[in-house]
Image (spheres, helix red, strand yellow):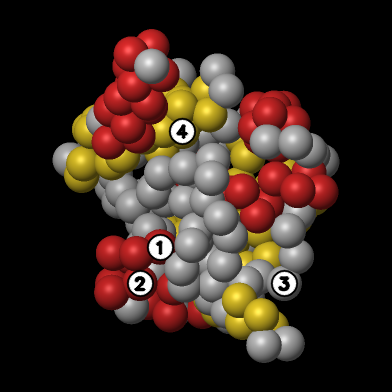
Amino acid sequence: MKKISLILSAVVMTAMMLSSCGGVASKEVTIGKQVWMTQNLNVDKFRNGDPIPEAKTDEEWSKAGENGEPAWCYYNNNPDNGDRYGKLYNWYAVNDPRGLAPEGWKIPSDEEWSRLADFLGGESVAGTKMKSTDFWADYGGKSGNGTNESGFSGLPGGFRDNDGTFDGIGEFGFWWSSTENFAYNAWYRLLYYDVGNVTRFFNIKNYGFSVRCLRD
């Protein structure tokens, strides 16, 4: 009994541990042998202190993508969305050599995302365990929320299209990986409100997705 109590205490302490995230406290959780942030990234500076350009207008967002330049935004350019969902970043910010992830963290690779899904039972069931217990849309009279038994706390932060259009808040959660697919594409993971799986796919680098960091 004492051993079980010690294990449970360690899990709680790990989940509540605070770490520096660009000056913002961020919770973390151990899932298998990986340590993940439980919040989406919400920084506006690279690791070296250089500012990451904010792209508010459709024109600014499209131009950044066309030029292969880093950019971030809030969903619908509303800072209130940042408090819950973090920022949306194009992949050029993810891959910038100045480092998007704070010190001690990294952007997970495609393989590291797969390792997470495998630990949670595979892509077909991991999504439910990764989704938060609130904020997901209903479908057919049934809640789209997950169980969050993993502690990942995945939120439906939506995305920004390459032309600047926002869509999907409350329904989709997209997270970049650090792994390029082809010259114009990179791998990502998707959680969707009406299914329990986590989807692996690729998209063009001009899109704006959430970012979740992994301990380096």
Residue at mark 4 = 36
Other-residue count near label 3 (Cα within 10 Å), few / some / many at <14 / 14–19 / ≥20: some
Query: Counting residues from the N terminus, which is met first, the one under dot 4 or under dot 2?
Result: 4
Mark number, residue 81: 2
Judging from the image, what secondary structure is the residue with disc 4 in?
A: strand
Residue 100 shows in this picture: no
Q: CA distance from mark 4 to mark 2?
A: 21 Å
The amino acid sitting under disc 4 is: Trp
| Residue 50 place in picture, x, y as percent | 28, 40
Q: CA distance from mark 3 to mark 2?
A: 22 Å
The amino acid sitting under disc 3 is: Asp
Residue at mark 1 = 85
Judging from the image, what secondary structure is the residue with disc 3 in?
A: loop
Query: Counting residues from the N terminus, which is met first, the one under dot 3 or under dot 2?
Result: 2
Observer-side mark, 4 or 2, equals 4
Specify the quadrant that holds the C terminus.
top left
Which residue corresponds to the image point at 68% horizontal and 36% vertical from the top-left? Answer: 120
The quadrant in which residue 71 appears is bottom left
Judging from the image, what secondary structure is the residue with disc 1 in?
A: helix
Q: Nearer the viewer, residue 13 or 162?
A: 13
Q: Is residue 53 left or right of residue 212?
A: left
Mark number, residue 194: 3
The amino acid sitting under disc 2 is: Asn
Q: Nearer the viewer, residue 203 or 117?
A: 117
The quadrant in which residue 9 appears is top left
